[in-house]
Amino acid sequence: MIIVMKNHATEKQIDDVIRWIESVGYKAHPSSGVERTIIGAVGDNRDKSILKYAESLPGVEKTMPILKPYKLASRESHEGNSIVSVGSIQIGGPEFVVMAGPCSIESEEQLMESAYVVQKGGAQILRGGAYKPRTSPYSFQGMEEEGLKLLEQVRLRTSMPVVTEVVNPADVDLVESYADLLQIGARNVQNFALLKKVGQSRKPVLLKRGMMTTIEELLMSAEYILSSGNPNVILCERGIRTFETATRNTLDLSAVPVLKGLTHLPVIVDPSHAAGHWKLVIPLSRAAVAVGADGLIVEVHPQPEMAVSDGAQSLKPEKFYQLMEEIRALAAAIKH
């Protein structure tokens, strides 16, 4: 249920409504727009008729049911677009944001060189995997906490915010002590224990769509995070599994405008995992800009042929510079 406050409702009236919602067993999720505040009341649906009583409270204009199963992620519950801050970088606002770096952290030298390349090219956030969930148990699984320590060192040297994946609920507290943005990978999009745990974090969350996840399922996964108390969620389209084998996955570009119509959350695109080959990353990135994505997350490696994971889809420095030039020009042209 959404409780819509009157235009000039006072802070006390808003606080009183929030307290009343919580007193009847629901969680209150206020959202302040330019003209008014709306409050989402989320909880057990069996006796939600009691929430109609809110219309008699001072400062309340009306109550409205939320029709979508994803209550807090829906545009019905939030005025305008959400902007998620990662350090000083804002995602979902007017600036197109690029996250870039290696698939896996391999060494201090490799990570520092990668950070230098992506920062020089104009990326705002450094990516690097310390925990790597892999299809094969014999593949490189990441440097774990040692990788996180390297990520922190590089962040301090470059002043770039960092994003890295967390795969285990037990590791969330550790990873959030090093990272500015917590990534939930495609394989964990419906790991509900993990989603609830990052929902209790103070750090924003990058939620990747699973290989066989529908858009509604992606939004329901976001709902787990939002309903656990963390309002700072970024969605990522990274390709889905289809009958096509020419690419690693099939990039569902239509997901971007569809999501933009359904949710207030920012949406970015991962062309690297969608394509599986570096030659396709630049054209898919241009397409992502064109359909209205808020940003990209791209794999970059100083020597892709030596990478321990995903070298085939990683851009060399000169190709990353080309990518940044092209998407800057395209983003500027679309604005005008």
Image: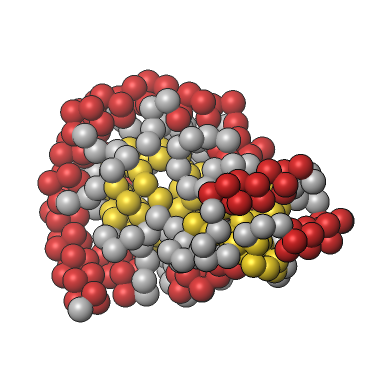
For the residue pair 194 and 233, the one nearer the viewer reads as 233
Nearest the camera: 107 or 325?
A: 325
Left or right relative to 262: residue 248: left
The percent position of residue 185, horizontal first and vertical second, equals: 50, 46
Q: Position of residue 240 (x, y in %)?
A: 52, 63
Location of residue 64 by image quarter: bottom right
Q: Where 154 falls versus 182 (above or below)?
A: above
Q: Residue at x 80, y 51 (%)?
A: 44
Report the number of numbered marks: 0
Picture residue at 51% right of the left edge, 44% below the top: 184
**Residue drawn 45% across and 37% down?**
203
Residue 63: x %, y % from top left: 70, 66
Tell me: 237 left or right of 327. Answer: right
Q: Is residue 195 visible?
A: no
Q: Residue at x 20, y 78 (%)?
A: 336
Q: Residue furthest right?
A: 46
Given residues 58 and 201, the one toward you in this image is 58
In this view of the protein, can residue 12 be seen by the observer? yes
